């Protein structure tokens, strides 16, 4: 069962530009998380935002959460070529530690 | 540095073989998970475990089983490998309670011929 859906599926930008990815989900959550995956590798946890939080920052990352719309966005500011990767949102099924992942956004940052 | 280690990066097996994918974590995490990742389908949960000797089915358990005899090790077993089980397999562990995110292994790319 797919809980999160990312939009867009693919995004290409120049270095220095900002990248915004969106995630929509279907059911109540405790928290929403974002992960990055470099080609052919495992996922790396980026940031976790709880259902009672609206915004969270970590370095060049900013995540927002709107539980009324069941949506979240990930903003990467001043993108670098090294940010090229796939980005996934994941939501926990309420009261469990099980994460349901979306299909991801492929971000390409050109030097 | 904390780690989740998957025993093989690449694996090629024949149809009908019994396949073992091993995952070890050194973080004393309670929870461990097995996902498979396929293009266009994202990550799908196969099995997970909240404690030693405990296991629960995920969304796609058919054709798979798991074993967790020790806290640090979670094995995924393909009872009789089939070509439609060709995929990237990802193991993860977590503290639980939504405290922090998952820590993933590097993945095992399994090809069944």
Image: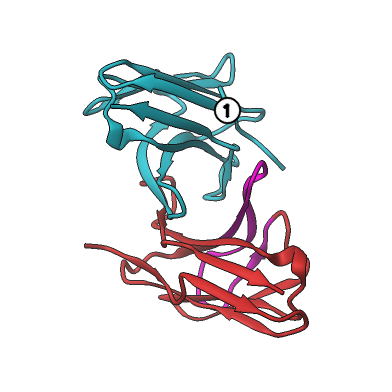
Chain colours: A cyan, B red
Q: Where is residue B70 in the image (x, y as percent from the top left)?
A: 45, 82
Residue at mark 1: A9
Give the answer, above or below, for where B102 lies relative to A70: below
Q: Where is residue A97 in the image (x, y as percent from the top left)?
A: 52, 50
Is A18 in front, or is B44? Answer: A18
- Crowd band around label 1 with a 10 angstrom C-alpha radius: few (<14), some (14–19), many (20+): some
Residue B91 shows in this picture: yes
Indicate left or right for B53 with A18 as reference. Answer: right
Q: Residue at left 60%, top 38%?
A: A103
Indicate left or right for B77 with A85 as reference. Answer: right
Q: Residue at left 27%, top 63%?
A: B2
Which quadrant would residue A3 be assigned to in this image? top right
Is A108 in front, or is A37? Answer: A108
Classify mark 1: helix, strand or loop: loop
Main SS of residues in magenta? strand
Which quadrant would residue A9 be assigned to in this image? top right
Q: Position of residue B112 (x, y in %)?
A: 69, 73
Is B103 in front, or is A52? Answer: B103
Image quadrant holding the C terminus of chain A, namely top left
Query: Is residue A91 within the magenta segment?
Result: no
Residue A74 shows in this picture: no
Q: Residue at left 58%, top 20%?
A: A70
Is A82 in front, or is A97? Answer: A82
Q: What stretch is highlighted in magenta?
A: B34-58
């Amino acid at each position: 069962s797919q809980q999160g859906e990312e939009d867009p599926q693919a995004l290409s930008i120049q270095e220095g530009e900002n990248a915004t990815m969106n995630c929509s989900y279907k059911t109540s959550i405790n928290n929403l998380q974002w992960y990055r995956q470099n080609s052919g590798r495992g996922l790396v946890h980026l940031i976790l935002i709880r259902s009672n939080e609206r915004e969270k920052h970590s370095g060049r990352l900013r995540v927002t959460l709107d539980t009324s719309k069941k949506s979240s966005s990930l903003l990467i500011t001043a993108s670098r070529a090294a940010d090229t990767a796939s980005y996934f949102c994941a939501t926990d099924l309420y009261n469990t530690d099980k994460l349901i992942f979306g299909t991801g956004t492929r971000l390409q940052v050109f030097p | 540095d904390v780690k989740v280690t998957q025993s093989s990066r690449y694996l090629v097996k024949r149809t009908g073989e019994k396949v073992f994918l091993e995952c070890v974590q050194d973080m004393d995490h309670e929870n461990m998970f097995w996902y498979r990742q396929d293009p266009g389908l994202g990550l799908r949960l196969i099995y997970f475990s909240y404690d030693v000797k405990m296991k629960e089915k995920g969304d796609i358990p058919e054709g798979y089983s798991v074993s967790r005899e020790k806290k640090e090790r979670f094995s995924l077993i393909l009872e009789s490998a089939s070509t439609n089980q060709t995929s990237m397999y990802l193991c993860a562990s977590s503290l639980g309670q939504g405290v922090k995110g998952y820590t993933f292994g590097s993945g095992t790319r399994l090809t069944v011929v």
